[in-house]
Image (cartoon, coloured by chain):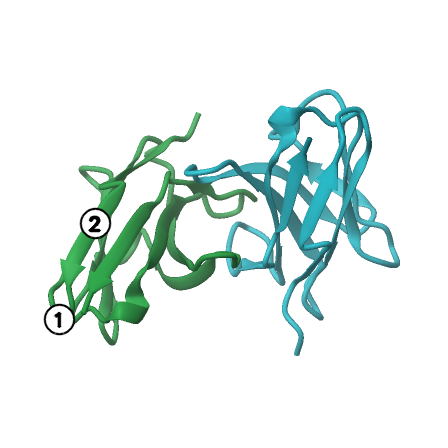
């Protein structure tokens, strides 16, 4: 049973480009969460999605960031016009029941903006 | 909003000694407290969790205690081993809401 799959593991983008981060939840998990981790800091909640629905996006920056979890395929975190401050590790977690429980995290995507 | 503070930020112990990491939370409605271990280059892994109706939970060498009155909870690792070296995060959430609030992490080093 594969875990939460994130790709790419490493992503380098120039300022102004777009970054697309993908997350495939564990089989049977319909709840997906995205977190951002800055160096030497904890994980900050960004967004919670279920299939075709954004449930809570209270942690998402108002501009340039968007997320989706389509009926088919992985969840996508999209960052438009990246800036140096977007450099971080982005982790996806999935859960079978939501409610903040039973999270399984992926290995993350490390985004570097040059 | 909810805030979780974690101490210490770094902790070095000799193999075989115990390690204790402490967290405090701000929202008295919080009722679920997981602990995660993150090894270098990997995602966080759940190692133990506790709910607010329980004061202590143990799983082999790790235990978590919760003091609801003081709004703090602690991770205890006994008989530490070099493979326990990692960054440990505490978190808190309100059951039936959807996000975990994480502490800033503790880097534990266990020296042989």
Badge number at residue B28? none
The residue labelled by disc 2 is: B11
Q: Residue at x 43, y 37 (%)?
A: A41
Q: Is residue B59 visible?
A: yes
Q: Secondary structure at mark 1?
A: loop
Q: Specify the quadrant of the image occupied by residue A63.
A: top right
Of pointers 2 and 1, the one earlier in the residue sequence: 2
Mark 1 neighbour class, 10 Å CA radius: few under 14, some 14 to 19, many 20 or more: some
Q: Pinpoint the chain carrying mark 2.
A: B
Tell which residue pokes out farthest to the top in this image.
A63
Viewer-side residue, A56 vs A92 = A92
Tell which residue pokes out farthest to the front in this image.
A114
Viewer-side residue, B65 vs B47 = B47
Viewer-side residue, B27 vs A58 = A58
Q: Quadrant of the C terminus of chain B?
A: bottom left
Q: Secondary structure at mark 2?
A: strand
Say left or right for B19 vs A110: left
Q: Quadrant of the N terminus of chain B?
A: top left
- Which chain is the one coloured cyan? A
Q: Specify the quadrant of the image occupied by residue A78.
A: top right
- Which chain is the one coloured green? B
Say left or right for B54 vs A47: left
Mark 2 neighbour class, 10 Å CA radius: few under 14, some 14 to 19, many 20 or more: some
Q: Residue at x 62, y 34 (%)?
A: A87
Tell which residue pokes out farthest to the bottom in this image.
A1
Q: Residue at x 35, y 53 (%)?
A: B88
Q: Is residue B97 above or below residue A105?
A: above
Residue A34 position, x and y percent, is 63, 44
Q: Pinpoint the chain carrying mark 1.
A: B
Q: Specify the quadrant of the image occupied by residue A45.
A: top right
Q: CA distance from mark 2 to mark 1?
A: 14 Å
The residue labelled by disc 1 is: B16
């Amino acid at each position: 049973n594969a875990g939460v799959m994130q790709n790419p593991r490493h992503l380098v983008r120039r300022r102004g480009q777009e970054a697309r981060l993908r997350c495939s939840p564990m089989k049977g998990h319909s709840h997906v969460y995205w977190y951002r981790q800055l160096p030497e800091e904890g994980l900050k909640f960004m967004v919670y999605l279920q299939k075709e629905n954004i449930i809570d996006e209270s942690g998402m920056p108002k501009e340039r960031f968007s997320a989706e979890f389509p009926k088919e395929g992985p969840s996508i975190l999209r960052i438009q016009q990246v800036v140096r401050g977007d450099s971080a590790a982005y982790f996806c977690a999935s859960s079978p029941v939501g409610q903040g429980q039973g999270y399984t995290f992926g290995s993350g995507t490390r985004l570097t903006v040059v | 909003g909810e805030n979780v503070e974690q101490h210490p930020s770094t902790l070095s112990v000799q193999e075989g000694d115990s390690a204790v990491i402490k967290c405090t939370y701000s929202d008295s409605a919080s009722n679920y407290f997981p602990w995660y271990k993150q090894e270098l280059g990997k995602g966080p892994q759940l190692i133990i969790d506790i709910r607010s109706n329980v004061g202590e939970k143990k799983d082999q060498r790790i235990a978590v205690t919760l003091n609801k009155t003081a709004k703090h909870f602690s991770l205890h690792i006994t008989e530490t081993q070099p493979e326990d070296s990692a960054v440990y995060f505490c978190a808190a959430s309100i059951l039936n809401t959807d996000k975990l609030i994480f502490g800033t992490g503790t880097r534990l080093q266990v020296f042989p």
